[in-house]
Image (tube, rainbow, N blue to C red):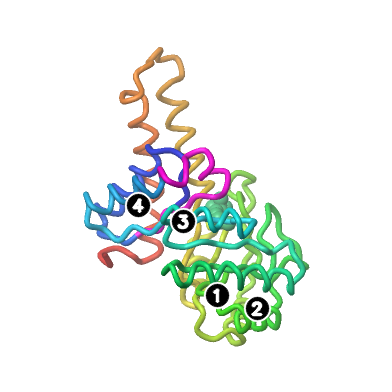
């Protein structure tokens, strides 16, 4: 999953996926979707799907309430991530069930989360495999985001996450076939990403590396150039985002899978 909040980023992600014949998940957090617009994201996803023939899925990432996820589902998102990781497990389960019921009969996938993926990692944030089992059994969530030492934004803090594969194996053993999601993919060692995929991660989320690429491309093309024409200063930012997406698609092994 590649996050975006601007059409140049969206174009960069899709253009690269087309070039590499890779299916792709586009993601918007609550903040990103409020800036871009839920309806706008769906409409442009539809345009890009039609134009490219590529499987392009749209996910509402880290939704904190049923009400917001309902809006995303009603707008036409393909999947929603309910992030109830800060809630007590029972409350997390209760709201996930409600989200799933609403999502399910509209053909929308639900991603749940057990354990916490914040902007740092702590022992107590790690997913408890027993809790993950209870959660997945009771909610029947389609996907499950887990915390195994991964955290958001590590690339911008220049701190590489240290993934705990024993925890991942224990979770996998307890939850069975539910597809696992690894958040905070930016800045994670490539070998660790490959290992996580081998052990059951089917969706990896990348945001910070794309933001850094976009911002540095923009800075480079604007600084001192006096350029004011968006279609002249945006391509550099687009190219930088494309480079990151290409690296990740290669790493994730989704080339030629569309
Ligand atoms: O939900 C989005 C991601 O988990 C992105 O994390 O910004 O560290 O790549 P990241
Ligand atoms: Zn995340």
Circle 2/circle 4 CB separation < 8 Å? no
Quadrant in which residue 232 is drawn: top left
Q: Say which residue label 2 marks.
A: 135
As displayed, is residue 218 above or below residue 63? above
Badge nearest the viewer, 2 or 4: 2
What is the quadrant of the C terminus in the image?
A: bottom left
Q: Say which residue label 3 marks.
A: 74
Chain part drawn in magenta? 24-40
As displayed, is residue 8 above or below residue 20? above
Name the residue located 46 percent from the left edge and 63 percent from the top edge: 79
- Which tag, 3 or 1, sits closer to the chain's start? 3
- Which tag, 2 or 4, sits closer to the chain's start? 2
What is the quadrant of the N terminus in the image?
A: bottom left
The 10 Å Cα crowd at callout 3, few under 14, some 14 to 19, many 20 or more, is some
Q: What element carries label 4?
A: helix
Badge nearest the viewer, 1 or 4: 1
The quadrant of the picture showing ligand 2 is: bottom right
The 10 Å Cα crowd at callout 2, few under 14, some 14 to 19, many 20 or more, is many
Q: What is the C-alpha distance between the residues marked 1 and 4?
A: 30 Å
Quadrant in which residue 54 is drawn: bottom left
Q: Say which residue label 1 marks.
A: 141
Magenta run includes residue 106: no
The answer to whether residue 180 of the structure is visible from this angle is yes
Quadrant in which residue 9 is drawn: top left
């Amino acid at each position: 999953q590649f996050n975006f909040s601007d059409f140049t980023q969206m174009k960069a992600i899709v253009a690269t996926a087309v070039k590499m014949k890779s299916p792709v998940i586009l993601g918007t957090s609550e903040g990103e979707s409020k800036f871009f617009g839920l309806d706008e994201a769906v409409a442009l996803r539809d345009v890009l799907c039609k134009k490219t023939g590529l499987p392009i899925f749209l996910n509402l990432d880290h939704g904190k309430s049923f009400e917001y996820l309902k809006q995303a589902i009603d707008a036409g998102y393909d999947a929603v991530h309910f992030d109830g990781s800060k809630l007590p497990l029972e409350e997390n389960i209760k709201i996930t069930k409600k989200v799933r019921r609403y999502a399910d009969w509209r053909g929308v996938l639900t991603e749940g989360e057990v354990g916490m993926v914040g902007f740092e990692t702590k022992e107590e944030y790690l997913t408890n495999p027993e809790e993950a089992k209870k959660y997945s059994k009771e909610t029947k969530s389609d996907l499950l985001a887990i915390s195994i030492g991964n955290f958001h934004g590590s690339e911008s803090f220049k701190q590489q996450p240290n993934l705990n594969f024993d925890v991942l194996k224990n979770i996998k053993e307890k939850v069975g076939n539910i597809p696992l999601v690894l958040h905070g993919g930016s800045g994670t060692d490539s070998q660790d990403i490959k290992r996580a995929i081998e052990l059951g991660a089917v969706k990896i989320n990348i945001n910070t590396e794309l933001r850094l690429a976009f911002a540095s491309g923009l800075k480079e093309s604007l600084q001192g150039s006096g350029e004011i024409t968006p279609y002249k200063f945006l391509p550099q930012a687009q190219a930088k985002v494309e480079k990151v997406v290409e690296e990740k698609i290669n790493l994730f092994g989704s080339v030629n899978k569309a």
